[in-house]
């Protein structure tokens, strides 16, 4: 054993053990306040999950609508180009 360790162990107090509990360990509960606190945390978590799910779904639907509108615009532009070629014009009209 090193002299430093021996000196530190001699100076450090030994921890005192906790006294034994003499009552019924089944009676130690967080009580009504603890139940209410955990219930509120669970309730807030459920509402946050529902809100997050709604926001993700809304974002996905918006992206699908954007893609569909882009496809429709591309199809309309292709149709306008085809009509212009058939009519003999060089430049098709632009669709806003």
Image (tube, rainbow, N blue to C red):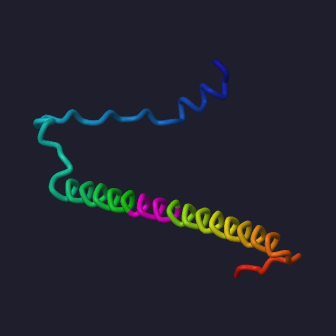
| Residue 75 relative to residue 63: left or right | right
Q: Residue furthest right?
A: 90
Is 29 above or below relative to 45? above
Q: Position of residue 38 (x, y in %)?
A: 27, 54
| Residue 12 relative to residue 72: left or right | left
Question: Dividing the image into 4 quarters, which one contains the N terminus?
Answer: top right
Q: Tell whether position 54 is magenta.
A: yes
Q: Nearer the viewer, residue 7 or 25?
A: 25
Q: Nearer the viewer, residue 24 or 5?
A: 24
Q: Position of residue 40 (x, y in %)?
A: 27, 60
Question: Dividing the image into 4 quarters, which one contains the C terminus?
Answer: bottom right
The residue that appears at 43% across and 33% down in the rendered structure is 14
Q: Position of residue 19 (x, y in %)?
A: 24, 36
| Residue 46 relative to residue 78: left or right | left
Is 41 above or below relative to 92? above
Q: What segment is highlighted magenta in the picture?
A: 51-59
The residue that appears at 13% across and 34% down in the rendered structure is 22
Is 19 above or below relative to 71? above
The residue that appears at 60% across and 30% down in the rendered structure is 7
Q: Quadrant of residue 9?
A: top right
The majority secondary structure of the magenta stretch comes to helix
Q: Nearer the viewer, residue 58 or 28?
A: 58
Q: Nearer the viewer, residue 88 or 29?
A: 88
Q: Tell whether position 56 is magenta.
A: yes
The residue that appears at 66% across and 24% down in the rendered structure is 3
Q: Quadrant of residue 17?
A: top left
| Residue 61 relative to residue 85: left or right | left
Q: Residue furthest front?
A: 87
What number of labels is visible? 0
């Amino acid at each position: 054993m090193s002299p430093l360790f021996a000196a530190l162990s001699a100076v450090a107090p030994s921890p005192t053990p906790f006294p034994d509990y003499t009552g019924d360990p089944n009676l130690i509960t967080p009580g009504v306040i603890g139940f209410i606190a955990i219930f509120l945390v669970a309730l807030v978590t459920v509402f946050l999950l529902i809100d997050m799910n709604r926001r993700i779904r809304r974002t996905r639907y918006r992206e699908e609508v954007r893609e569909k509108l882009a496809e429709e615009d591309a199809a309309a532009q292709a149709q306008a180009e085809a009509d212009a070629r058939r009519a003999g014009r060089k430049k098709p009209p632009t669709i806003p």
